[in-house]
Image (cartoon, rainbow, N blue to C red):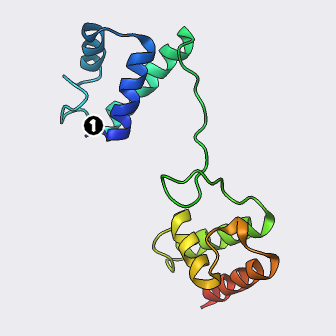
Amino acid sequence: MATPAQIKKIHCLKGALKLDDDTYRLLLSGHGAKSSKDRGFTYAKADELIKDLEQKAVAAGAWEKRKPAKKAVGAGSSRPLADDPQSRKIRALWIELHQAGKVKNPAESALTAYVKRMTGVNALQWLNTAQASNVIEALKKWLER
């Protein structure tokens, strides 16, 4: 079934293209659904419809396709990811730990929670050099175990 975020984007694109209900329903039926909340309207079919509508909207000049911004803590966060070399190293070690099966959740929010437990600091970009070095060394030791 299509996610609420997909349905929202479909409706935004419908509005941008100024589609009437008949045209919209015709598009939906072309992608195998009677409505956007139809149980047969799978995630993949919704994704196909979004790509189709985006192409039409961009061609019509009614939509601008942008890359999604990177988020730091959670879905509601507007803080960008730390991009300094130490933060990238911390992130790489975290992913390596996940791939080794030592960390269950590879998400940025899980890494942020770990860093907060170790240092008391809420975000990677707020770590000073010494704190970041301590986190890196702790992650390396964890990886060796």
Q: In the figure, 51 relative to 30: above or below?
A: below
* The C terminus - image quarter: bottom right
Q: Residue furthest bottom?
A: 145
The answer to whether residue 99 of the structure is visible from this angle is no
> What residue do we see at 29% from left, 38% from top?
2
Which residue is under mark 1?
A: 42
Q: In the figure, 145 relative to 69: above or below?
A: below
| Amino acid type, mark 1 | Thr
Relative image position of residue 3 (x, y in whole percent): 32, 41
Q: In the figure, 126 relative to 24: above or below?
A: below
The residue closer to the viewer here, 10 or 119, is 119
* SS assignment at label 1: loop
Task: Tell me which corner region of the image, top left, top right, bottom left or bottom right, holds residue 115.
Answer: bottom right
The residue closer to the viewer here, 85 or 122, is 122
Q: In the figure, 40 relative to 137: above or below?
A: above
Q: Is residue 69 left or right of residue 89?
A: left
Relative image position of residue 105 (x, y in whole percent): 47, 69
> What residue do we see at 66% from left, 89% from top?
141
Task: Tell me which corner region of the image, top left, top right, bottom left or bottom right, holds residue 126.
Answer: bottom right
Q: Is residue 100 left or right of residue 4?
A: right
Relative image position of residue 79 (x, y in whole percent): 62, 54
* The N terminus - image quarter: top left
> What residue do we see at 79% from left, 62% from top?
84
Q: Is residue 71 left or right of residue 21?
A: right
> What residue do we see at 74% from left, 81% from top?
131
Relative image position of residue 53 (x, y in whole percent): 43, 19
